[in-house]
Image (cartoon, rainbow, N blue to C red):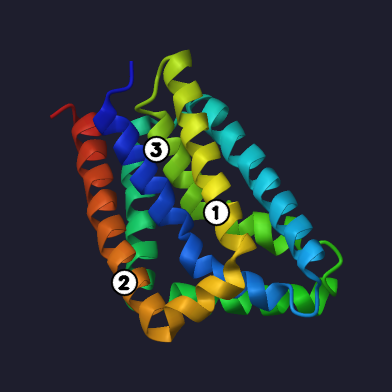
Amino acid sequence: MASPDMLVNALTTMLVTLDPPGLAPVFLGLTVGMTTVQRRQVALRGSLIAFGILAVFALFGSSVLGLLGISIGAFRIAGGLLLFWISFEMVFEKRQERKEKTSQAAITIDQIHDIAVFPLALPLIAGPGAISATVLLAGTFTSAWDRALLIAVIALILLGLYAVLLIAERLDRFLGVTGRAILTRLLGVILAALSVQFVVDGIRAAFSI
């Protein structure tokens, strides 16, 4: 059964990877001109779709890796390195810039036809970092009950993300540019430490240290 430490680690990893405060201003940019009701619908649909994607990877990600002949140790190393790169972007404010570019491109191409699916659910919420983190965590949550707990953790984080999107305008005004920068950098440092731990665990598993 999953220990309290494992649950705290899962909560922290998913929270930092999804970065709700960093997503709030991007969401505002995506929904410019929309009413409050329309924004709520986009936020709800995007969060639900992202939850579905992450839940599928939580349940079947390890099985897919097995079919491809990829060990969980190797994936932990690769996923840890990817998360470390994301943490690097967060600390040096590159991730926010990339998210904003992604949202702008989507507005140009799709004319906000269905931004809840793209780019909100994919790749802004359930992006490569979140998917990698989910599969990595699923490797430590092995039993059916543990996987259910992991999915509950993902649901809890996405519920919080949905709440942040609902108050995105007020949150963005409250934090301001300086507050957002400080929070993003702090979360980036935490994610860097977690990603290094994933790499260490992966090396131990791969080489049976």
Q: Which circle, 2 or 1, is nearer the viewer?
A: 1
Question: Does residue 88 lie above or below 51 as drawn?
Answer: below
| Residue, disc 3 | 136
For the residues carrying marks 2 and 3, which lies nearer the camera in this image?
2
Whether 12 is drawn above or below 191: the answer is above
Kindly tell me whether residue 68 is visible in this rendering.
no
Query: Would you say 126 lies left or right of 117 here?
Result: left
Mark 2, secondary structure of its residue: helix
What number is the disc on residue 185?
Answer: 2
Q: Nearer the viewer, residue 132 or 126?
A: 126
Residue type of the residue flagged with mark 3: Leu
Q: Residues within 10 Å of mark 1 (few under 14, many from 20)?
A: many
Between discs 2 and 1, the one toward the N terminus: 1
Q: Residue at x 37, y 78 (%)?
A: 179
Q: Percent position (x, y) of residue 205?
A: 24, 30
Q: Is residue 128 above or below residue 136?
A: below
Number of numbered callouts drawn:
3
